[in-house]
Image (spheres, grey):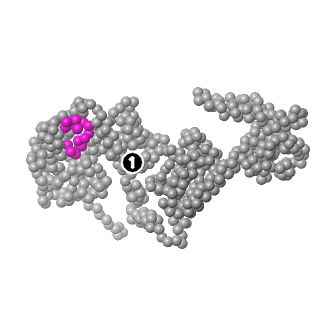
Amino acid sequence: MSQLVRPRCFDAVDLESARQALARVLPVAQNDTTWCALDYAHAHLESRFFSHSVGAALIVAELKVGADAVAAALLHDCLHATPDFDATFGTAGRLARGVAAMARIEALATSATDKRLDPHAQLEALRQMVLAMVEDIRVVLVKLAERTHALREKRVDREAYIKNIVERLQAELVQHDIEADVSGRPKHIASIVNKMQRKHMSFEQLYDIRAVRVLVKREIDCYTVLGLVHNLWQPIPGEFDDYISQPKGNDYRSLHTAVIGPEDRALEVQIRTVDMHQHAELGVAAHWRYKEGGKQDAQYEEKIAWLRRILDWKDDVADSSEFTEQFKTELFQDQVYVLTPQGRVVALDRGATPVDFAYALHSDLGHRCRGAKLNGAMVPLNTPLENGQRVEIITAKEGEPSRDWLNPALGYLITHRARSKVRAWFRQRDVGEQVGLGRSLLDKELKRLGVVDTNQEKLAQRLKFGKVDEFFAALGRGDVGHRDLINALQEPGKSTPALIPTAKPRTHAKSGNPVIIPGLGDVPVTLARCCRPQPPDNIVAYTTVGRGLTVHRPDCSALKRANPDRTMAAEWALDAGAAFEVDIRLKAFDRQ
């Protein structure tokens, strides 16, 4: 295709160059009609409009739809230049007028913003209008060619704009003795449309259709460049992201800011070091590409060492499932990453539940939470979330948090944010209602523990309350924790009649349980399968949702990740020399 198809924006194209370009793509038999239209357009159009018409004509010529269509592309901007236009150009003139009519339809489509109408119905109405107004399909082809060339011209304009921005910013950096590589690019129109559809955003909400990237050597220079950018152009409020101090989950690091550039056009500027850019483009493989031949970098070496540990684990474990679990534990030790129904990633503390997830999104969503689905399946609200699950919260129109959510033994809330939101909600309730809730909560807890009687005044005094009602109100608000209440129910140094009679240490419990809980006595327990405690190991009890108390070794790895508020003292109820069932693991070789 001739170079004139993509002329520099508004650059003049002389008549002879246009004639030579068209001659290369048109059959000789079509030249007479084309040359007549070319001379007419050159005589009656300004240079920039003439260049645009020639560019559109070259596109039509490549479609091989005849000389009249090529002539119409040259003439569509000069219909009323002379009174004998129709007589001079005949079919080409009629096609040119059809192209002008298409422009009126284009304006109508642009202004059709009535949201009350079905968009499909509007499109169908426009389609029927086009068919009614256009007698020759070549009119549509010429119009499409004209719009294609206009878009190419606009892209050249955007590229020129970015070039000016890069030169201006580069000069500013040189003036401040900052060594940097500045580059830019205009976003492709198709990419803009795809992003608008994918993120349901209007064109005015996009600030990265023009983007400039600045690469510097040192991290501190990133922030210096940021200050220079904000001095050059006005920053757009709320459009600054610091991914250097707070990297993304994939370790992406950069500064992003959006500013109002020249001609009041939005402009995105990304600032990062060369190392950050290499990592963003190639990940950990950038270590070899960029660092080859240079001195070792401690941070990169640490990342490579971590990858080597992963490979070592793969050789040590028995099967792939075990390797996967160890890998996930090392990679995401402290957090779990789940998805909203819209695909947004939410990071929560490991062990978090759907209720924690709801409060992480919005307090009102948490208060009205009544159920949850994980990957489409209904689950209890105290189900721990796992990486990659899609979480959907089921809500009531009007709801309130449950008092049980604050009980750590039930496992509804893990994160401090969610727990504080629930407590704040209960604090706002009337004192009288708080007292009633606290009294009901105490009765419920006493029944669960099997306590037959307790002195409420002494209980309030142990918890530093002057009056019983103050104690009940604090309990109703959630200011008194479950563990604090359990400790207060146990009188230090005394055999409390309020509790079930406790078994003496190192003696069999009445039910045959091998473990007793001081202060609670003979309650059902389960020995943990993760650390498999056995006498005379030191042990502790942990409140497990749905299974009561589970006994662990104090150094159990699972216990270290658990909530310490749900842990209490425990001891063996077996006499010295007593029999105790243990598991034995045998490893043998088949000699056959």
Nearest the viewer among 228 and 541 is: 228
Nearest to the observer: residue 408 or residue 434: 434
**Would you place residue 536 above or below residue 348 in this image?**
below
Q: Is residue 100 left or right of residue 556?
A: right
Direction front: furthest residue: 175
The magenta stretch spans which residues?
Answer: 470-485
Residue receiving disc 1: 348
Q: Secondary structure at mark 1?
A: strand
- Of 7 and 148, the residue lying toward us: 7
Residue at image position (19%, 36%) is: 470
Viewer-proximal residue, 121 or 162? 162
Q: Position of residue 142 (x, y in %)?
A: 77, 40
Label 1 neighbour load within 10 Å: few <14, some 14-19, many 20+: many
Q: Residue at x 41, y 65 (%)?
A: 309
- Image quadrant assignment for residue 111: top right
The answer to whether residue 371 of the structure is visible from this angle is no
Amino acid under disc 1: Leu
Residue at screen point 42% across, 39% down: 392
Q: Position of residue 450 (x, y in %)?
A: 16, 40
